[in-house]
Each structure stands twice: as structure tokens, then as C-alpha cells.
Image (cartoon, rainbow, N blue to C red):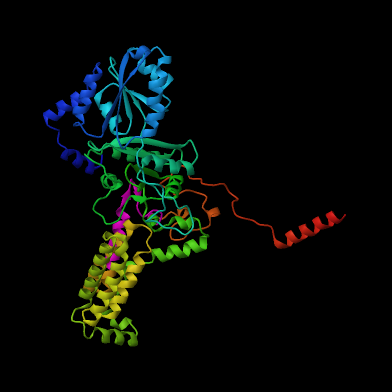
Amino acid sequence: MPSFFKNQQSKNKLPPQSDQTSSEQTASSLKNLLSENLTLIKEKTGNSSDIVIRHFKIGVNNSLAAAIVYIEGIVDNQAIQDYLLQSLMKDNQKNDLNDQNALELISEDIVTIGNVSFADNWNDLLSSLMSGDSLLIVDGINRVLSVSTQGGEKRAISESTTQMVVRGPKGAFTESIGTNLAMVRRIIKTSDLWLESMKIGRVTKTDVTLMYIHGIANDKVVKEIRKRLKNIDIDSILESGYVEQLIEDQTVTPFPTIYNTERPDVVAGNLLEGRIAIFVDGTPFVLIAPALFIQFFQSAEDYYARFDIATSIRLLRVFMISLIAPATYVAVTTFHQEMVPTTLIVALAAQRESVPFPAFVEAFFMEVTFEILREAGIRLPKAIGSAVSIVGALVIGQAAVQAGIVSPAMVIIVSITAIASFATPSFDMAISARLIRFLFILGAATFGFYGIILILLMGVGHLCSLRSFGVPYMTPLAPFIPASNEDTLLRLPWWTMRRRPKLISDNKVRQSKHQKPEPPSSRGMVNQEMEEDDQNET
């Protein structure tokens, strides 16, 4: 077991004795009397105003008292009315219901909703109630019938807001885990797409589902992810970021080791490569593991465009302008003026003549200012957020240049750096680059280009030491695997990518041989058309 979970378990103290007693009472069996069960439900839910209790009579001559209990707002009221209440109150007299067979006959012959189950203790009863199920309680029976009526208001499927594409599917995940799972099911129509569901969080009891393709996913990775999820012992899971931080291999690193996306086609593509998806109820972002470094620079659109276009665009993303552009400017103007053409260095010197600060302070000030403007633009309302960020950058930049605080060249460098950082498809990796950029500026101000190279070597060494569920983070670059380099910095044609990435999938073969397009030659087509014309004339 990883040391992280040992520390986590050591922090989780046993609850007080009173809590243990309460838990034992909650797990006890139900009462026979309907009134007692309803009273206990009210007590355990604090007489909450959204608990709805509907009393009615069933059986021959309405001899049995019963009640339906549900929570308003998280159930489908129309389903309760049409398939539960109407069936029970109008069709129940066709059966000889009594306190011995009522629930069995109702579940088999009367209720027309597909998913029903029985609960005979308070833990199961309250869990079903809080999940949106409706509870049917009959007087004289010490168990209840739980009917799946989950519903309520949900956000409709809309276009992705964080991973935009020009060509490709437009639908994105929502906050409903059922909708998200169905969207992937519509893409991958195979019985080997397996799901494992669990509830995490002592208070929230959040639904978490593990999805993978049996026969393609690595069984060892699936077992490790399942183990880490079950080891989570926390009171609440409000977003997939909670799960990500509790199961990742390395916490002291600025680089994300678990990929997240809100696009169903991205999840489907990663599942077909042998990865595992983790769905969390209440968030549109799905976690994908194991994750590789190069994966954060790949976009869904890369696989829908021709390979030469996709490769060219991908190289623009991987290019390190957003990482070392300010550091390079600081190093050149501070230590390595001889590397710059004379005309350019004279122009830079003339601009910096009135600037009272060294290049390091100038770059640091501008970078921090731009980060504040970017964060403010995100937090402000949409109607004014973009205007404030753009106008603020222009006004502050122009005013700083006129006041002699920064040079015009530094404003240009910071602007190019910001635009280049927006080209990174993954928001998590873009944030990492924004943080590491300050280390490069510090190294450049201290040792010039030698400092930049030193920080770069330290970063590469750190990346090579990372693991994502046991898989090296820099695979297939380090360790170098030639057979898996068809989809890294370059994206080769689809017909060349016959095998799935090594160290991730157990099933290596993706497609059969002889997939290369071989259209007939133009001369052969002309000859064939001439022969057909001759035959028609004859």
C-alpha cells in the first residue's frame, strides 16, 4: 500500500462511541408498524420539509395501510404518478395482497418501473432515499420496496467550454453521471465495456464509476485504481478533483499525472487505447489514467484531421515559447548581449535606458500583473470579464511603458508568452507551465543561458522520475519505445498505427495489416472506362 494511504488512514481517527452507537442503530432492521417506520424516517432526516410521505390503502377491501416516501426535487414526479401511484391505487385489488406477500406481488405484478430492490435495514433505506429512489412501506412488514425514480432538473447536453474543436463531436459531459455513462456507451457499443460503481464519502456518498474495456485495459492498472479508490476515507467528494488528489502517485509536483476531460469522444479514444476512466457524479470532468506527459499536448481534433496538418499544429503546441520566452529575454539582456545582432541590441538598450529596474524585476512584474489580469477575467461575470482583461492589459501595458517602468520589448515578450500558453489543450498543463516559467526567469537572472539549461535539465529529470499508476510519465520518450512513437510529437497516418501504446494496454494489436489506402491509378481507371464504353456500344 502506498505511504500516502497509510498516512491518510492514520489521520482518520475512530469516531466517538456515541457515533458508533448511532451507526449500529442505523444499521438495525426496520420495524413492523408503518407509523413507527415513518416516525423514525422523520427523525433521522430532521423533519426535513422536502420529505414527501403519501399515505394510501392497498389490498382487497383496502385492508393494508401503505405509504410512499420520497424527496422532492431529486425524483421524477411523473414516473411516480404514472408507474407507481396509479398502479398501486387502481390495479392492486386484482391481487390478494396481505402482509405476507404484498411486497413480492407488488414488485412482480403491479409496479411497472424496471429497477426495484428490497431494503431490510436503515442504512440501505436511507441510502436509497437520498439517492432519489421512492420507498414503498407496507404496514406489518419489516422491510421496504425501493423503486428507482431518480430524476429532477438536470443541465442539458451542451458544447464543451474548455476543449473546443473545429471538427469533431460537439457534445460534452454534464453533471449527471448517468448521462455521462450513456454518452460513452453510445460511442463504444461492446459488451466488453465494463463498469464498476461505488460510493465514496461518508457524508456525501458520491457515486463514482470505474469504466474500462475488458481485454484491452491492463488488469494490473485496473486493480491498482480500484484499490486506491476503495482506500479513500473522507467525508465528502464534491468534484473529481478530490479523487484525483487522493489517488495520484506523486503529490509534490506541478505536473498533472491524471488526465481530465469533458469530451465523450476523448474518453472513448483513451478507453480504446487501454486506459481507465473514472466518472464522478456532480461534475462534467472525467478522470483518465494512466496519463502520459505527451498526452496533455494532444487534442481531439488531431485525430480527425489529416496527419500532416495534425502534426504541424501539435508541434506548435509543444514548442516552448510559453515556457522560456521571458527567461530568454532576461538572459540575453543581462548576460549574453554578444549573441544578439548589434542593431537589435542597440534598439533594446535604447528602450531600457529609462527603465530603473533590471530585466529580472521587469519580467517578474509584468508576468505577475498579467496573471492577476487573467485570473480577474475568469472570476468576473462573462459580460465584462473579457473586456476587463483586454482593456486592463492594454491600459496597464501602455501606461507602464509611458511611465518608464517597463520597456516596450518586455510587453511584447509577455504578450507572446501569454498567447502561446493558450495554445496548450490541457488547462492543467498550461497552469504548470505558468508556474515553472518563474523558475526559468530566476535561473536566467542568476546564470543566464546556463541557468535556463540547468532548470531544464532538472525539469526533465523530475519528469522522468514521475509515474502514473506505475507507468513512466515520459513514455514512450523515456524509456524510448520506437514502436509507440507514432503518436507523440508526430501524428503518423492512421494506417501506420497498428499497435496500442506499450505499458498501458494488454491487447497490443489495434488494427489488421494492409490498411494503407491504395486507390487505382488514373490510367487504369481510364482504360477500364474505355472498355466499359466499348462493351456498351457492342
Q: Is residue 334 visible to us here?
A: no
Q: Is residue 516 above or below residue 309?
A: above
Q: Would residue 330 be counted in the magenta stretch?
A: no
Apparent side of residue 178 relative to residue 520 in the rendered image (left or right): left
**Residue 38, located in which quarter of the rendered image?**
top left
Q: Is residue 190 visible to us here?
A: yes
Q: Residue at 34% across / 35% down in the picture?
A: 75
Task: Please give the range of residues in magenta.
Answer: 453-479
Q: Residue furthest right?
A: 538
> Between 19 and 360, which is closer to the camera in this rendering?
19
Apparent side of residue 298 relative to residue 417 in the rendered image (left or right): right
> Between 410 and 55, which is closer to the camera in this rendering?
55
Q: Residue furthest left?
A: 17
Residue 80 image position (x, y, % from top left) = 37, 30
Residue 299 image position (x, y, % from top left) = 43, 57
Residue 27 image position (x, y, % from top left) = 22, 24
Residue 441 image position (x, y, % from top left) = 25, 70
Q: Where is the C terminus found, in terms of image quarters?
A: bottom right
